[in-house]
Amino acid sequence: MIPTIPTPRALTVIWTSYVVLFFVYLTLPLAVVAVFAFNDSQFPSLPWQGFTLDWFFGKTSPKIGVFHERAILGAISTSAIVGACVAILSVAVGTSNAFLFNRYKFRGRGLLYVLMLLPLVVPGIVLGISILVFSSTVANQLWDAAKIDATFLRPGLALVILGQFSFITTIATLVISARLQKFDTTLEEAALNLGASRLTAVRTITIPFLMPAIVGAAVVAFLMSFENFNTTLMLVGSDAPLTIAMFDRLKEGSTPLLNAVSLLLMLGSSLLALILIAFQKRS
Amino acid sequence: MTPDLECTALTRRFGDTLAVDDVSFSVPAGSFFSILGPSGCGKTTIMRMIAGFLEPTSGDIAIKGRSVLDVPPNKRPVNMVFQHLALFPMMNIEANIGYGLRRAGMSKGEIARKVDEVLDRIGLPGVGKRKVDELSGGQRQRIAIARCMVLEPDVLLLDEPLGALDLKLRERMKIELKSLQAEFDTTFVYITHDQSEALVMSDHIAVMNKGRFEQVGSGQDLYYRPETPFVASFVGESNRWRGTVERTDGDTVQLRTDTGLTMRAAAKGQAAKGASVDIFVRPEAIRLGRDAADLAQFDNLLSGTTSSLLFNGAASRIIVTSDETGGEVEVTLPQSGEFADLKRGAPVHIGWSAAQANCFSAGED
Amino acid sequence: MAASARLGFILLLMPLLLWLTLLIIIPHVDMALLSLRERVGVGEYETSIANYKTVLTEPLYMRTFMRTAVMSIMATLITLLIAFPVSYYIAKMVRGRARSVLFLLCLIPFWVSELVRTFGWMILLRETGVISQFLQWSGVVSGPVEMLYNDAAIMTGLVYTSMLFMVVPLVTTLDSLDDAVIEAGYDLGGSGWSVMREIVIPHAVPGIVSGCIVVFMLSLGNYLTPTMLGGKDSLWFTEMIYSQFIVRFNWELGAAFGFMLLFASSFIIWAMLRLTGQTLERTMG
């Protein structure tokens, strides 16, 4: 049960093989997605027709590779823009929230803290439709009252960003709060004592201390935005982010092009994760 | 009578390091046995082997004469009080104490009766429904002992359980542990790196260093009659010098320290003329006098100057610098008050007997 | 000093309040109002509970609702059962480097989107898929087998996609259990099973609860997995919300559906917290 307690050999063997099986289960779907990106066939399935890189670099139909497929490249850049906006917004608000909950004791703090956690337990699709409903109400009233056509309140990227921001902020707040709690406030007092103003003390002492958490929260926010499906689905307009674009294609029937995109996504996020780990180690 | 616990040639290796090296000892029934040693000396390894959480590389452990090597930890007739107590935070006090009884399949009524009884015995009646974190450090200590004692083990192991307590409480718990042991009349095996815990409570103490037992004996044995330089330096405090034997006379030797002091000392083991030796003299074994004539009965006399006063209440000392050679000696200040007016720079005389100066042939430490 | 502290407090409070009121509270209130509105003519509306009546009386809606809830609970339990031994293994049975590597391995699949994960299962499970081909090749079956588009496929996908959210809190809480406490359990005569039941599992309750809450919520609100792996007849509640909003453009009914989903998830989370004596702050924050 733990290494210091004698355990029957059979139990250890069974347990270990179970864990191995678990990891096979975990990696199998991703492995097949990756492997079939190189299959020289119209369909991502057996039989194996030979190795090709056409699904990455192919220029001619029907095998147009990722790097020559305008729609997919466009969707990737849309996703990247949305992800960056969500990351910046949610980290900014998350940092502010972290300071608020850590540094101030005020009436209603407990209630606000629970409210702050709520977006995590509201299903994504419900968050999506509630924002859709509210923004349409506002847009309609603006039109009725002043004949202003507020296009940014109609389904589109602005709403997608707001929708994702609405729950990713909670995660950013939790990540940054966790580190701020570990901060020794006497360091700030020492800075004040040495002649810094309150803001300078925060800027030069506290924020650098928080940096690993801030960067971590930004990367997590970016990835969550990039991967988000449910909330985005309800708020998307004409420019579809990558997950929605892939979903639409998948409904029509898949080609190994999707495998190639998926493989690139895996590589991209592993790279981000590695950079993040390296950054956390350094600081 | 068979001893409650007997370890024979107990050895444990971790990779290349020998954590416990051929240790044999036996603990008579009803006694309080301590293993005293610095951290990393292997005492925890011995304890974990007795409890069953580590397998010895070789050797045998017998409890009441029966080898327990093949008995898993949950079946051994020994129980353990863990270093941080390991009380179950998810249970109240009653459930903690009753845990082992439930495992033994005892009926509910019987368990409740036994739990109440043991709570009475440890002087904490009525705390059964409380949570673990509602009790103070000392109370938790007693609960951890009670949790084991309800099972009536043959041997109770205690793994530095006082380490986490503050100084005042630790002093009180030493006395309490000793009286609990008398109350339950069970064999206690206690490990610690704190000599005062071991000296106050134990009937027998094993001093352990680098995987081996240096000496096993009563507190007095270790303090007055150390058999190895390690024991002499680890138990109590000492002036320690390196020196050379100039003359031997039976068990007494005449020697000169590297700092220039000359003295007569009791040789422990081999000490031929010209041999390099370590000499240990306790500061409290040295008598202080205003006049050399007051100290005529001592084998070793020295006159010098008080070069430092180290005031520390009952444990106050002075450092005396020899006028002749400049060597330094730490001396405990008597508490009778006659030297209360001693000033820095004041001339003093000191003396100690050869029997109080232990001399060992010089080892590497 | 007091005045500037007050100003700082207000400046920090503003973003929080704006975020919570404009993006969380008011939209949900607005959705609630919309769900209580009935269209009686072109451009004419009345306040009524007609939409909720429709949900409760139309058997298809009700059946879908119950089915979604039950399947989500099952998915949560299965995830817990699969994840617990693995988490225990990572937290308590391996040491040092091997353990951080195993923990990272658990996280890696979740760096890619749910869409890719679901796509992987489609490649594996469909009639022309890898598993079907493998079974034919090995001679277990003679013709292609369709393993997609049934409840087992949905369950596989749901469990897979939520695994991380169970493993991480479980490993974290199990890790915080001092080995000495487990040893004490054995030392006092406990067996593997009784130590598990009386010490390890009670200690892991906060982790179990927070894992279950997240997994349940993700399953209940999942759209992708049931649609892609369950096919046209998967009958998942989120699909009905989607079709009312986007296909039929009946927002009033869609909002009512949304509220029922929110209610179901909140109720079960509340019940779970209540049963185990936990609070939302402790389990999530």
Image: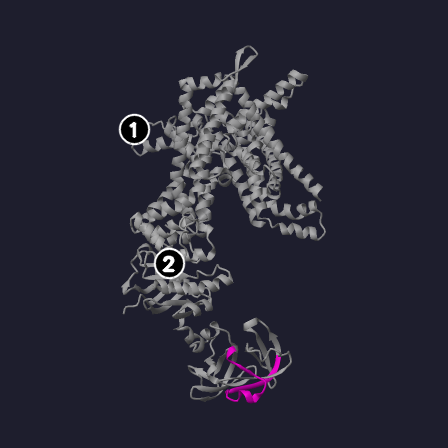
Q: Are marks 1 and 2 on the same chain?
A: no
Q: Which residues are magenta?
A: B284-306
Residue B187 sits in which quadrant?
bottom left
Q: Amino acid at mark 2?
A: Arg
At horizontal 50% and vertical 31% (from top left) the residue drawn is A55
Query: Is A260 on the left-hand or right-hand side of A2?
Result: right
Q: Position of residue B302 (x, y in %)?
A: 56, 85
Q: Is residue A223 above or below residue B200?
A: above
Q: How many marks?
A: 2
Label 1 SS = loop
Residue B72 sits in which quadrant?
bottom left
Residue beneath disc 1:
C142
Disc 1: which chain? Answer: C
Dot label at residue A4: none
Q: Position of residue B7 (x, y in %)?
A: 33, 66
Viewer-nearest of discs 1 and 2:
2
Disc 2: which chain? Answer: B
Q: CA distance from mark 1 to mark 2?
A: 75 Å
Q: Is residue C253 above or below residue B14?
A: above
Q: Amino acid at mark 1?
A: Ser
B303 part of magenta stretch: yes
Residue beneath disc 2:
B121
